[in-house]
Image (cartoon, rainbow, N blue to C red):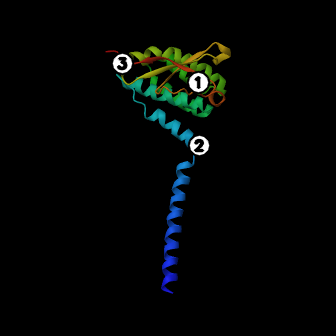
Amino acid sequence: MRMNFAITAILLTLSMTACKNEKKQQQVEMNSPAEVKKEEKKTADIADQDFIDGMTGKVWHNYLQTRMALTQDDAEGAATAAANMAEGFGEEKPGLRELAESIAQAEDIDKQRELFSELTKETGDLFAEALSGGTIYKQYCPMAFNNTGAYWYSDVPEIRNPYFGSKMLKCGEVKDTIRPKK
């Protein structure tokens, strides 16, 4: 009887250990699209860029959020981030504030993308001149807007195309790196 009890105890211990290992493997191997989107959203929050003024830092953060929303085909998220960006410009940059407000008010994601391209053209010097730490990546998609091409800025070198989103997420290349002026 003691032998049966010992064998039962050993088998019970082994099965509990095996179940624990299985659960760990399942948790590690799970990789749903929702988890990937959560990971991409973290990218904007861990940017290593610093700016000489608070306005540009806030605008940069909201610019990245707008770009990320566009890469995820999320018109509502792009509108929210662009509205926050417009607030960040305040009275200091009325033209840029109006462009950001236009993105926030556009209901069509294609229109948002078009306006984002215009905003990118206008903010390049602002970001480059105020950058005090880190690197900004100027990226380009030659196929955007019927092959006329368009740029965007990123905090990481990996391509996440805001103009095509899920259709062609990785279409593009890094054209320039912007570093602080010494």
Q: Nearer the viewer, mark 1 or mark 2?
A: 2
Q: Which residue is mark 2?
A: 34
Residue 84: where, in percent of width, then height?
50, 30
Give the side of residue 148 with respect to residue 8, left or right. right
Mark 3–mark 1 contact, CB under 8 Å?
no
Using a 10 Å C-alpha cutoff, classify the residue at mark 1 as few (fewer than 14 neighbours), some (14 to 19) or many (20 or more). Answer: many
Q: Which residue is mark 3?
A: 180
Instruction: State the separation of the CA atoms marked 3 and 1.
Output: 28 Å
Mark 3–mark 2 contact, CB under 8 Å?
no
Q: Amino acid at mark 2?
A: Ala
Mark 1–mark 2 contact, CB under 8 Å?
no
| Of pointers 3 and 2, the one earlier in the residue sequence | 2
Using a 10 Å C-alpha cutoff, classify the residue at mark 2 as few (fewer than 14 neighbours), some (14 to 19) or many (20 or more). Answer: few
Instruction: State the separation of the CA atoms marked 1 and 2.
Output: 25 Å
Q: Amino acid at mark 3?
A: Pro
Q: Nearer the viewer, residue 134 or 45?
A: 134
Q: Nearer the viewer, mark 3 or mark 1?
A: 3
Q: Which residue is mark 1?
A: 103
Please tell me whether mark 2 sits on a helix, a strand or a loop: helix
| Residue at screen point 57% across, 32% down | 69
Most extreme residue toward the front is 3
Q: Quadrant of the C terminus?
A: top left
| Residue at screen point 54% across, 26% down | 159
